Image (cartoon, rainbow, N blue to C red):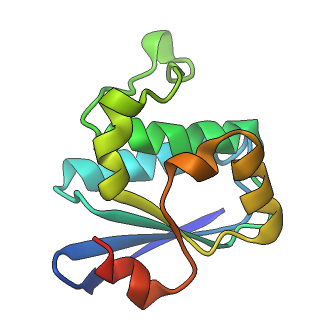
Amino acid sequence: MQISFSKHGGRVLVTVMELAGDIDASTYMDVINRAQEIYDEGVRDLLIDLSKVPYVSSAGLMSLHMVVKIFSGQSVSAKGGGRPSFSAINQERDGSVRAHVKLLSPQPAVEQVLDVVGLKQFFEIHTDLDTAVKSF
């Protein structure tokens, strides 16, 4: 898994988190940790580029959910050094973060998984970088 960042100016400064490789049990914590780092540095508008992610496991889905929790200001710290806690996305509590965390160009297999588990209805998904940046 490779994770890189770039900044794009629109109405607001948007950080693009480009993920490359599978998001699975061996990489999901990297996604969570890097998202926490940039949030702690002050980033508030995040576009997650999934164009180079061919596969997302249940752990990968959890990492996307944890990014939502991070950007809604909730703690995702693991208790006792284990996994972060997982809870359902709450539209009332987490809905406002939808305006600040969006997805870019998931591959068809990844988009299908997002649809099956209901995350496609939660995340705003774009297929064009410029349009996505302007949507913030």
The residue at 17%/75% (across/down) is 12
Q: Can residue 29 be seen in this view?
A: no
The residue at 55%/18% (across/down) is 82
Q: Estimate the x, y position of residue 95 in percent, counting from the top left.
A: 35, 40
Residue 102 sits in quarter: bottom left
**For residue 71, above or below residue 126:** above
Q: Is residue 127 left or right of residue 42?
A: right
**For residue 90, above or below residue 81:** below
**For residue 58, above or below residue 52:** above
Q: Estimate the x, y position of residue 121 in percent, counting from the top left.
A: 57, 49
The residue at 52%/39% (across/down) is 65
Residue 57 sits in quarter: top right
Q: Which of 128 and 33 is in front in this view?
A: 128
The residue at 21%/47% (across/down) is 40
Q: In this view, does 34 lie to the left or right of 61?
A: left
Q: How many labels does the image show?
A: 0
Residue 90 sits in quarter: top left
Q: Is residue 66 left or right of residue 117?
A: left
The single residue placed furthest to the right in the displayed view is: 109
Q: Is residue 45 visible?
A: yes
Q: Estimate the x, y position of residue 18 in percent, counting from the top left.
A: 52, 72
**For residue 94, above or below residue 96:** above
Q: In this view, does 112 lie to the left or right of 43?
A: right
The single residue placed furthest to the bottom in the displayed view is: 130
Quarter that holds the C terminus: bottom left
Quarter that holds the N terminus: bottom right
